[in-house]
Image (cartoon, rainbow, N blue to C red):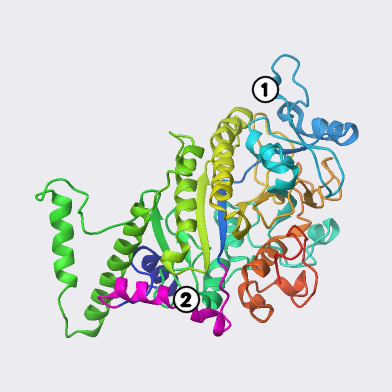
Amino acid sequence: MNSFTRRRFLGQSACSAVSSISVMNMLLNLQMAGKAAAQGVPTDRKSLVCLFLHGGMDSFNWLVPRDPTRYATYTATRGNLALPIIHPTEPELNLRELVQSGGDGQLYGIHPSCSGLQEMFNGLGGDTAKRRAAILSNVGTLIQPVTKAQYLAETVPLPKSLYSHSDQVDQWQTSVPQGMTQLSGWGGRAADVLHTTVNDVTSIAMNISLSGNNLLQVGNSTTQFVVTDSGALRLTGEDQSSALHPLRLKNAAHKSIIEQSYANLMQQSYSQLTKSSIELQEFFLQQFNNYDASAISGFFPSDNWVASNFLAAAKMIALRGQLGLRRQTIFISHGGWDHHGELLDSQAEMLDLLDPALLAFQRALEQLGLQDSVITFSASDFGRTLRSNGNGTDHAWGGNALIMGGPVQGGRIYGSFPDLALESNNDTGYGGRLIPTTSVDQFLAEMLRWFGVPAANMSYVLPNIANFYNVNSSSLPIGFLKPGTWT
């Protein structure tokens, strides 16, 4: 079993070793949190929530220019996929107007299915002081800045296997587009730096996934904690009604095995590791189930699995203190965005599911008073071609990403919105495959500065960051954070 496979396995079965009285120790450590300030440990709590849109979202039908000149270019390039500013007979299909409070000062609209994002961009609940959403335009994987001429001449290093789903997912999650011999994710490496120095000694893992194992949260010395929207994955089988239920009997036998002592070192280590994992899962599940979510559950639409994941995320954020976490990342995956065909109908249906979940999540954070300690952002394999393939679009490169939360200067479009004309200086020459003008490293570095990763450790977390940004700078790489929210 190689080291990466082992870490992925441990993400399901274990997070960190604790004794048989781990729950008691955890509670005692929580009572000692006041000592953290005297030791220079931050006493605030912050969470980064990654929404990964697997498949490659067509984000240039999600964010659309509305001024006459750029919209004319958009419609000429997109052809039968272009969305109308004003639909002649069905107003519910109109682009939703975004009113910028700064940014590039241009006119934009957002997809008709995104009324929630429109509200968060323009002002939550109509309050322009609560602009919680912003969009970063034309971001993608880069090793170093690239021009069209350099791309065509291949005179600078390019990300490996551009336009490949698996490779680009890995590169977004590692932020090392040239590839790695020792696979780890940027979130995992951030945990390597922060978890043992910031979070309580007996806390669960800093990185929590609601979507199974992922590369983003795998560190070199830390692991991820995999849960479901119903809480932790448990082994005891206590949720089975019958004492003779086969799963309960199997789990009881497994538990009996790991309760024993073994002379063989590997057997004993595995037994203790599994036992510790079970104890942490049970502790987490107890906290999760005991949390009263009545104040926020009404925000989340029923029969919406994406909303269920975001409700669970809201609960986990509210439980940071009980879980011993001052820093926390949460990973949520939403797949199915590979729209080679039926782009218009399929994307609308998927955004109908996603948009109310995002709005509910932000409203829940506001209700809990946690809006200023959480940043939510989207990522995806890649953008898609601007030109239609007949009924959909194909794999491309640069795309648009969402950033939302109280620390974000919302109501703005960040980065450089590209020229959407085919064969432009942004286009690699294959039907509108746009060269990113902002790197994933710049995007992540800004959030990681807010999160508390020291400048001295930034190159460990983001190995290519020096190609785009001076980590000792007094300014931010992009500038979407509010002044005073980062150091």
- Which contiguous range is marked in magenta? 19-44
Other residues around mark 2 within 10 Å, as few (<14) / some (14–19) / many (≥20): some
The image quarter containing residue 93 is top right
Residue 33 numbered mark, or none: 2
Q: Position of residue 225 (x, y in %)?
A: 41, 63
Q: Would residue 189 be found to the left or right of residue 28 on screen?
A: right
Mark 2: amino acid? Ala
Residue under label 1:
92
**Looking at this rendering, what residue extends furthest in the top direction?**
89
Q: CA distance from mark 2 to mark 1?
A: 51 Å
Q: Is residue 135 magenta?
A: no
Is disc 1 placed on a helix, strand or loop? helix
The count of marks equals: 2
* Residue 385 showing in the rendered view: no
Q: Position of residue 189 (x, y in %)?
A: 55, 73
Q: Position of residue 58 (x, y in %)?
A: 66, 41
Q: Position of residue 438 (x, y in %)?
A: 76, 58
Q: Residue at x 77, y 22 (%)?
A: 86
Q: Nearer the viewer, mark 2 or mark 1?
A: 2
Residue 449 versus residue 115 in the image, above or below: below
Mark 1: amino acid? Glu
Q: Would residue 470 be found to the left or right of residue 201 on screen?
A: right
Q: Residue at x 31, y 58 (%)?
A: 286
Residue 51 versus residue 93 in the image, above or below: below
Q: Would residue 132 be found to the left or right of residue 213 on screen?
A: right
The image quarter containing residue 423 is top right
Is disc 2 placed on a helix, strand or loop? loop
Location of the N terminus by quadrant is: bottom left
First in residue order: circle 2 vs circle 1:
2
Q: Residue at x 48, y 78 (%)?
A: 196
* Residue 379 showing in the rendered view: yes
